[in-house]
Image (tube, rainbow, N blue to C red):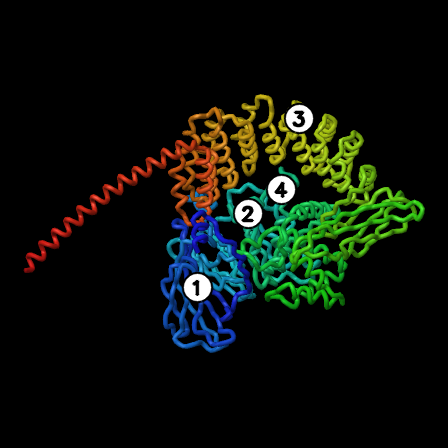
Amino acid sequence: MAAFILLTSLGVRAAEPMPRHYARDRDFQVRHLALDVTPDFRHRSVSGTAVITFAPNGQPLEEMSLDAVDLRIQSVGSTEKIAAYNSTTDKLTITFDQPIPVGRESRVTIVYSAEPRLGLYFRTPELGYKAEDEHVFSQGEAIEARHWYPCFDAPNEKFTSEITCHAPADMTVLSNGRLVAEEAEGNGQRMTHWSQDQPHANYLITLVAGHFKKWEDHHGEIPLPVYTPPSDEGDVALTFRDTRDVMEFYEQEIGEPFPWPKYGQVVVQDFVAGGMENTSLTTLTDRTLHTAASENLQDSDGLIAHEMAHQWFGDLVTCKDWSQLWLNESFATFYAELYNEHKNGADADLYAAYGTLADLVSHSSDPRPIVNRQYEDPNERFDYLIYPKGGFVLRMLRAQLGVALYRQCIKTYLERHKFGNVVTEDLASVVEELSGRSYEQFFDQWIYHGHFPELEAHYAWDQKTRMAKISVRQTQKVTDEVFLFEFPFTVSFGEKNGSIEQTVNVKEREAEFYFPLPEAPRVVTLDPHLALLAKIDFPDYTVEMARAALEDSSNLEGRLRAVEKLRGTTDLLSVEALKRALQHDACWGVRHEAAGALLAHHSEESLAALLDSRAQTDARVRRRVMECIAGFYEARAFAAERTALASEANPNIAEDEIRALGRSTEDVRALLLEALPSHSYHNTRANGAIAAMRARHDESYLPPLIDYLTNHATEFNSRDFGAALDTVAVLGHGEDNKDKTAARECLLRYVNDRRQKVQLAAIKALGVLEDPRGIPALETFALADAADPRYGAATNALAAIRAERPPAEEWKELRDTVLDLQKTDTKLRGDVDGLKKQWEAQRSGRKKSER
């Protein structure tokens, strides 16, 4: 016990096992939820009535427990007699006078109000947003709905729902399902009623109300409306033009019609994520919108396709609990990739898979499985395991089953479980049934256990026998969490007249395979279709093979691996090969990677190759070439950036070129000060100028920057404005800048900003500034609840400031503080003694008078 107390006092906790989470008990079945709510935009609050129709499950219900975080409960009524109800900070518990029999349908009616910290987000002028864009939106996933209405807040309950909202008459109100009624009310209000007639999970309930512009398309009888803030200059028709095509593709690929009466998309400001797949109405970040000037750099197809895929995977069939989240997110990730292949071709799909695989194998020390019950908070589940890794597992499953059989399995899986909850076994059982093969090992090693194969592969050619030998060794550490894997392994042997592919089964720690070939292959490519999640070390892959592979237009994976190999070489022949690929390869991805490989060479010849390759028809490659040129600290490079900037119409590339000039040896002050106030969509040029000022570490930029931020704050989104505040701190901290007053005062203006992202950025920036005079403000936030993000930001900022202060100064402050406390204590003791004497005198006087 003593040791525990000591460790606790030092801020150390004894190691405890991570809690395990399971699907929630369902003492009662929610059949319908009706919300009648009125948002108060001035006070950022909501008042409402929740009517929950339910029936007990399993046994008579004596007590109903609902999630209700910081709700002010005004009254609770019911069709059953209520003995009592109790409201705590996170629960509403209703006790019935008599147990309700199993199956009997009953209702509770709860009148409440709230000022939600989560779940319902206001964007109002008081919070720094434009009045013309004022709106409010909800966010339910994972467990935020409980912050703005009482509910059963878990994914393993499905029910129908309706929302009636009373909002200003000039606002648009949106929700799930179909619009039932709109009716003018008194006092400039209007009632809007939406009904979701098909069952769905609680976290998918949505409410959006505010000022929006509407654009609409259709897919057959299904309306496809899009709503955006009025002031946003983004091109809605351009951004969302492929929504109909995505839906048509999914209906054909999945084999199940779109399941809801509409598919709306609404763009909100400072959304908490990229998008949220609420049933029939997806919420999207305002960064989704873009203009034609950005060319293909701001393509939102991936996000739009991901969120729409959820309408089947996540909304129609829903994971039973958060441990099974991959059945929502991995499917949405994978189907967005399938749409990319449908729209942009097989090479686009392979290049995306190449990037995904490179990222996945970088997580070499994480043994966690995809299905994992150990977590503190369900939001921890939304990580790379659930998105790209799960998506890649589905890619492998599709490759092993074949496209036709895979489609049949998915269609059957959806048909059997529509409007219900699913676990991994539901998918596995369908796959086994329809394929006639055991897939226990597949799901066991890829879903229920962690990591991936780490392979060391070797190649040898025997001229006498005309046999190629491939040796494969699994080098990953095998534990209870990580297996020796069994998997199909494809090898491609490139020859003069084409290539020969062979697939073998790897299941041992070490294995050797022999392949008869007509001649020695010019190129050997492992996993040519990127259908295996594995980290492959192939030391026998030669530079000569790589140069030959770059000439093979039929083998994209081979060309990408070739660029990767040549990145690590220094000879001029490799530079020339990479230059040819950058200028002539048919796939933009190969050109993109070739530019990066030339930067890695970092020689005069590679810079010359990049400078000769600036004329690129694809904006993604043009941007990459200019980024790589900027990676050279040379006058030729800076001159190229300045020349390109003068004629660059793409705002995103122009932003990068302005940033690059921040490292220039030339005087670019006039250029940066000119770029700062220049108009561009999403303020991209100003963002580039601010980043360049930061890179130059010149505090003379501080006054014009502070002045611009003060007068143009509303022109930035929260993220970019936060980055600008960080630049203020960096410039204010400059070694030659002894007076940090201007920077400190600028940052202090935003430590109470009602936009959380801006507030947190200001708090963190005070730590970067390292001005002790910012300590009093930071200490107020360090008193917040430990779960409050401001607490963490403030304590880290305080630690940064105090770490820079001389120990003698810290001890002097501590000594002064102690002396002040002693003086205060002495004074308080004297005051208490005086009060005590007065009380005793009065008491003595009363006793005398009583006698």
Numbered mark located on residue 285 in the image:
2
Q: Position of residue 10 (x, y in %)?
A: 45, 47
Q: CA distance from mark 1 to mark 2?
A: 29 Å
> Residue 755 versus residue 40: which sits nearer the camera?
755
Numbered mark located on residue 637 in the image:
3
Q: Nearer the viewer, mark 1 or mark 3?
A: 3
Of the 4 image quadrants, the one containing the C terminus is bottom left
Mark 1: which amino acid? Answer: Ala
| Secondary element type, mark 1 | strand
Earlier-in-chain disc, 1 versus 3: 1
Left or right: where does residue 412 sit relative to residue 586? left
Q: CA distance from mark 1 to mark 3?
A: 64 Å
Numbered mark located on residue 571 in the image:
none
Earlier-in-chain disc, 2 versus 3: 2
Residue occupied by mark 4: 298
Residue occupied by mark 1: 50
| Secondary element type, mark 4 | loop
